[in-house]
Amino acid sequence: MNGLLLAIDQGTTSTRAIVFDTAGHIGGAAQQELKLHTPQNGWVEQDAEDIWRDTQAVCRAALAQSEASASEIIAIGITNQRETTIVWDRKTGQPVCKAIVWQDRRTADFCARLKEHEDTVRQKTGLLLDPYFSGTKIKWMLDNVSGAREKAQRGELAFGTVDSFLLWRLTGGKVHATDATNASRTLLFNIVTQDWDDDLLALFDVPRSMLPEVRDNSCLFGTTDILGAEIPVAGMAGDQQAALVGQACFVPGMVKSTYGTGCFALANIGPDFRVSKSGMLTTVGYRLGGKTTYVIEGAIFVAGAAVQWLRDGLGIIKSAEESEDLARSVADNGGVYMVPGFVGLGAPYWNPHARGALVGLTRGATSAHVVRAALEAQAYQTRDLLQAITDDAGYPINELRIDGGMVKNDWVCQFLADMTATPVLRPQVIETTALGAAYLAGLHAGVFSSLDDIQKNWHCAHRFAPAMKEPEREKLYAGWNHAVKQVLA
Ligand code: ADP
């Protein structure tokens, strides 16, 4: 089938649109940085109107760059930063306040007060009680925006994560819907029954009338005319789940890991829900034709952000790319380890109070050792996650599919393979998040007849085979574990 697919990739730091042909090649792309507001310590907000304005602008710019006309776009797919919460007035379409971004910690005390319910929450949602997810952010808005709770009780307000807000705007207020992956990050959606859960709605004090309808990831969500032709919106998924689809991880045991600002590893565990025993999350990977595939997810908060800190905080590199040559310039890490717990430690430690550390410094340590330690840390943390995934899933992990800005660094990829003793595969298209959204749209539009068809589009550009001898690998990993213990102490 000829024609093009348009992916909207609404991320935390920027909004992007990419036009793909049906073989997954990029025909046009545009990007707009997005402003973050931090009005108080621990608060992180964005303006939903900025998100909407930028989305329209990048869609038009990407289409112009592809030199195609709107009528050549077969379908649109949306992927987005997850958990970020927007509440708007159904009549006016106006948000009641700024969007509360996933990083926002303002509801930490409320989450702590609910701790006794964590087990129930985990059995229904696969998540932990943490301010990261949307549920407590909605409650905060209802409790703190003047008149909001009364309006919500009267059914006048709508809640959505960014996907649903964009869909509402794209369809001129006609459709209030989300998809199962985005719903699975709210703490309100029961991922076993695949419905909003009345017990959870009561716990978080959120009226059901505010919530969007939850649909499959690939279906007709609505149509939009913002580009001058009526185009179906036919795919939707949260960013990490879209990357899972873009990496074609459709078989239980397949794992993708994305190295951007942070790192997210998702492992397909198939159709059976299972609560993690190793501090990981269980979440919806994708839902197609009413059938849910679950994943185990682990997050490392600081990946590429550590490289940004070397550049902007320490000033020991001028660009992220420079980190590769510096890491190669020393024979080993010289005993230096960086635990990049700048904002606490994520899975499998979940310690919000931990802070970063550089350990093992001697007079022989140079800036190259520090840079190397920051890059090595990504591989140690990945090994921690893969170990937890293996314990949970009970599957051996045969390969790791990687993407994100950091994987342009060959040294990182090779060290990742060495430290995890797992082949690491870098695909031809590393824009896997946007590609996944395009695939989901294309699946509904008939561009692809099945997941097998999508799998055939996935091509490995580089395979990094593990080359390190076991004693060296274990010695290095023991050094990492020792450093983490010092941080946790
Ligand atoms: P996000 O989508 O989270 O904004 P990207 O996937 O665009 O992130 O990746 C950007 C991150 O990758 C930055 O934090 C940057 O420091 C890091 N990065 C980019 N190039 C390299 C490189 N060659 N080596 C190491 N890190 C890199």
Image (cartoon, rainbow, N blue to C red):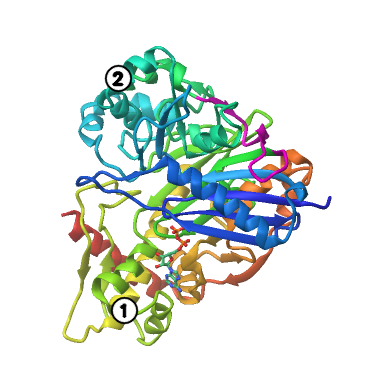
- Mark drawn on residue 147: 2
Could you tell me which secondary element the residue under label 1 belongs to? loop
**Residue 375 location, x and y as percent?**
37, 71
Is 362 left or right of 257, judged from the image as shown?
A: left
Q: Is mark 1 within 8 Å of ligand 1?
A: no
Q: Give left or right: position of 311 versus 65.
A: left
- Amino acid on which disc 2 is placed: Gly
**Where is residue 429 drawn, in percent x and y?**
63, 63
Q: Which residues are magenta?
A: 212-231
Viewer-side residue, 208 vs 426: 208
Q: How many marks?
A: 2
Q: Amino acid at mark 1?
A: Asn
- In this orientation, which residue lies closer to the viewer: 293 or 7? 7
Residue farthest to the top? 154
Q: Nearer the viewer, residue 111 or 43?
A: 43
Judge whether residue 197 can be spotted in this image. no
The disc, 2 or 1, on the residue closer to the chain's N-terminal end is: 2
| Residue 29 left/right relative to 137 | right
Residue 12 vs residue 384, the one in the foreground: 12
The reply to whether the magenta stretch includes residue 440 is: no
Where residue 346 sits in the image (x, y, percent)? 32, 50
From the image, tell me which residue sits under label 1: 333
How packed is label 1: few (under 14 Cα within 10 Å), some, or many (20 or more)? some
> Disc 2 and disc 1: Cα gap in Å?
57 Å
In terms of image quarters, where does ligand 1 lie? bottom left
Tell me which corner region of the image, top left, top right, bottom left or bottom right, holds residue 26.
bottom right
At 28% across and 27% down in the image, what residue appears? 145
In the picture, measured across the screen, residue 113 lies left or right of residue 127, that is left
Question: Where does the image place residue 475, in percent across and percent down from the top left?
Answer: 33, 71
Q: Is mark 2 within 8 Å of ligand 1?
A: no
Quadrant in the picture for the C terminus: bottom left
Q: Is residue 475 above or below residue 215?
A: below
